[in-house]
Image (cartoon, helix red, strand yellow):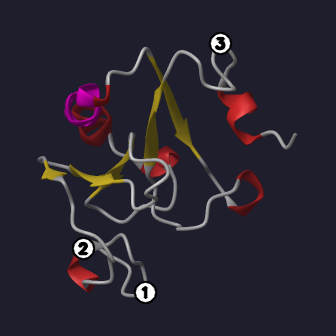
């Protein structure tokens, strides 16, 4: 099932980039922001707006998708990870097809040692 207007539904051919990996129920996108190359997104093939709509089988496969994302980002040499879902416009979701952000974190970053909130706070 897909939404004909959704750019993350692969059947629509609306992505501006190419998936870096395809698994059974998820695919991975790398970062298109050259200033943030050590990031990826885990995206379900099936169109769902939020992770609350994922099936039990999709949740069961999420671990393999996260492992694939970690493996793709490990060459950057991160010392930590931040994982996050934006769910709903109020929470910052811009594409209403569920996707999990996988962000490699590094010692010496301005936000090193601080949690997910520090990544989004304005100075």
Q: Which mark is residue 5?
A: 1
- Asked whether residue 11 is in view, the answer is yes
Left or right: 84 as drawn, with respect to 46: right
Left or right: 15 as drawn, with respect to 122: left
What residue sits 33% from the left and 77% below the top? 16
Tell me where residue 118 appears, x and y as whole percent: 74, 29
Please, what secondary structure does the residue beneath circle 2 have?
helix
What residue sits 44% from the left and 44% below the top? 100
Please identify, in this view, whether the residue under mark 3 or under mark 1 is nearer the observer.
3
- In the rendered structure, does residue 66 fall within the stretch colored magenta? yes
Tell me where residue 27 appears, x and y as whole percent: 22, 53
Q: Earlier in the sequence, mark 3 or mark 2?
A: 2
**Label 3 to label 2: alpha-carbon separation:** 36 Å
Please, what secondary structure does the residue beneath circle 1 have?
loop
Q: Earlier in the sequence, mark 3 or mark 1?
A: 1
| Relative height, residue 113 to residue 82 (above, below) | above
Residue tagged 3: 113
Residue tagged 2: 10
Left or right: 91 as drawn, with respect to 121: left
In the rendered structure, are the residues bearing label 3 and label 2 in contact, judged by CB atoms less than 8 Å apart?
Answer: no
**Label 2 to label 1: alpha-carbon separation:** 11 Å
Q: Earlier in the sequence, mark 2 or mark 1?
A: 1
- In the rendered structure, does residue 2 fall within the stretch colored magenta? no
Q: Residue furthest right?
A: 123
Please, what secondary structure does the residue beneath circle 3 have?
loop
Question: The N terminus is located in which quarter?
Answer: bottom left
| Relative height, residue 45 to residue 106 (above, below) | below
In the rendered structure, are the residues bearing label 2 and label 1 in contact, judged by CB atoms less than 8 Å apart?
Answer: no
What residue sits 21% from the left and 79% below the top? 11
Q: Which residues are magenta?
A: 63-75
């Amino acid at each position: 099932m897909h939404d004909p207007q959704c750019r993350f539904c692969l059947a629509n051919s609306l992505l501006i980039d190419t998936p870096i990996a395809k698994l059974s129920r998820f695919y991975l996108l790398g970062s298109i922001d050259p200033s943030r190359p050590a990031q990826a997104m885990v995206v379900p093939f099936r169109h769902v707006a939020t992770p609350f709509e994922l099936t039990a089988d999709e949740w069961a496969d999420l671990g393999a998708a996260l492992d694939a994302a970690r493996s793709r980002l490990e060459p950057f040499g991160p010392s930590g990870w931040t994982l996050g879902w934006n769910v709903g416009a109020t929470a910052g979701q811009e594409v209403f097809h569920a996707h999990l952000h996988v962000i490699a974190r590094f010692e010496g970053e301005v936000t090193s040692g601080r949690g997910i909130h520090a990544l989004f706070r304005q100075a």
